Amino acid sequence: MTDRRHVVRAATPADAVSIARVHVASWRAAYIGLVPAAVLDGLSVERREARWRATTELPMERRVWVVEVNARIVGFASTGPARDEDLPIGAGELEAIYLAAEFWSTGLGRPLFDRAVGDLRERGLDPLILWVLTGNVRGCRFYDAMGWRADGCSRPIDFEGTAVEEVRYRSP
């Protein structure tokens, strides 16, 4: 059984490499069969680290949260203003949430999700949305359990010539 003692906190630039490792590993575990293998094989911890370092160095509108178990980062979430043009100004978005695969179904996703969504609400952002790959059954079940629902909006994502659909969820 996984030790559930955890800490959820704001990420710092020093966390960038750990966030990048979780990001790459969780994509490779979660998106097998959904995203082309060449895309998953081409993921780079170094490129993701640079992205997460830049995001955490100047956390203004976009914020990153991490969950640690025994001082090890095992998941992260990022938030910010919604990027969808059809939403009103002041909408918020849970841009990403990922856990290392060995921590799936341990209960750690909920406190991370709650902190990220709580941050959006504390900033007064409304409505709140997120995007999830249609075939990501685990992710969809999680968001459904959190009370979020698909709002009927979908879009294709192009992964090196392979279109993969994602759907938009809204908070209750």
Image (cartoon, grey):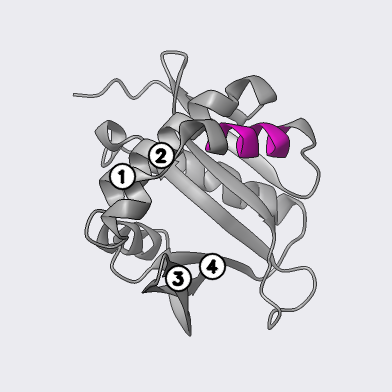
Residue interval drawn in magenta:
48-56
Q: Look at label 4 and name its amino acid.
A: Ser
Residue under the point 46% across and 37% down = 44
Under tag 2, what secondary structure?
Answer: helix
Instruction: Looking at the picture, tell me which residue is in the foreground, 91 or 155.
Output: 155
Which callout, 2 or 4, points at the residue further toward the start of the chain? 2
Which residue matches tag 1?
28
Cβ atoms under marks 1 and 4 closer than 8 Å: no
Q: Above or below — where is 117 with respect to 106?
A: below
Label 4: state its secondary structure.
Answer: loop
Above or below residue 171? Residue 118 is above
**Does 3 sit left or right of 131 as displayed?**
left
For the image, the number of numbered tags is 4
Q: Is residue 31 visible?
A: no
Asked if residue 51 is among those painted magenta in the image, a careful observer would answer: yes
Which element carries disc 3, helix, strand or loop?
A: strand
**What crowding class fits label 4: few (fewer than 14 Cα within 10 Å), some (14-19), or many (20 or more)?**
some
Residue 118 coordinates in the image, percent (x, y): 62, 49
Residue 98 lies, in percent from the top left, at 43, 44
Rendered-image quadrant of the N terminus: top left
Which residue lies at the image location 63% right of the left edge and 29% below the top edge?
11
Report the residue marked by disc 2: 24
Residue of label 3: 158
Which label's residue is closer to the chain start, 3 or 2? 2
Task: Estimate the spatial distance between the alpha carbons at disc 1 and disc 4, rounded to whole Å.
Answer: 27 Å
Mark sitting earlier along the chain (4/3): 3
